[in-house]
Amino acid sequence: MDPIFTRLQEKFPFLSVGTYLDQEYIGIVQNCDSQFLAMYVYNHISDEELRKRFISYGEIWWWETNRQLPINLYIKDEFKIFKSYLCQFSRKEFQVLHGPTVSLNETMNRRIKRKQIQLIKALK
């Protein structure tokens, strides 16, 4: 693995790195499904204070949750300042090179399966 990715993973495990149309993007994936990937893009944040807050919220989300809930749903109102940095990409053309991806669709499927298992009664 590339040493830059290794250092990034150690220091900021919540950040994902990907490429789209020969451009590299670093940020936190909000949701990823079969058609689209939505990411809060760190590269687009120019204000240094906002960058620090973004990293701080990322750490809170990463260490205080099970990471199946998107960051904007966990942090809520405080994270609204980053709404303008949310970018949608075509999933077919976006290649995730490193980092976690959150999928609400996958989470919902797991919960439905769990409920179906609980509804089955054992016959004696």
Image (tube, helix red, strand yellow):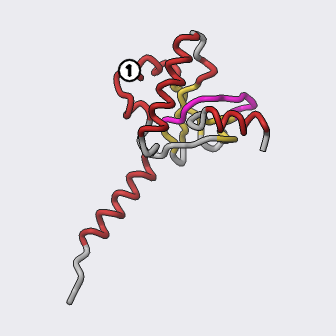
Q: How many labels does the image show?
A: 1
Q: In this view, does 77 lie to the left or right of 4?
A: left
> In the picture, which quadrant includes the N terminus?
top right
Q: Residue furthest bottom?
A: 124
User: Compared to 1, does 21 lie above or below?
Assistant: above
**Residue 40 drawn at (x, y percent):** 53, 27
- Chief SS of the magenta region: strand
Q: Where is residue 27 in the image (x, y as percent from the top left)?
A: 59, 29
Q: In which quarter of the image is residue 100?
A: top right
Q: Nearer the viewer, residue 5 or 110?
A: 5
- Badge 1, how many Cα within 10 Å: few under 14, some, many 20+? few
Q: Give how far across and how far down residue 65 sits, in percent.
A: 42, 41
Q: Where is residue 106 in the image (x, y as percent from the top left)?
A: 45, 52
Asked whether residue 18 is drawn in magenta, I would say no
Label 1's element?
A: helix
Q: Which residue is depicted at the point 41% across and 23% down? A: 79
Magenta stretch? 19-30
Indicate the amino acid at tag 1.
Glu
Q: Does the magenta stretch include residue 21?
A: yes
Return the residue nearer the eye: 63 or 105: 63
Q: Which residue lies under the disc numbered 1?
A: 78
Residue at figure coordinates x 49%, y 39% from the top left: 31
Which corner quadrant holds the C terminus? bottom left
Residue at coordinates 45% horizontally, 31% vertically from top-left? 60
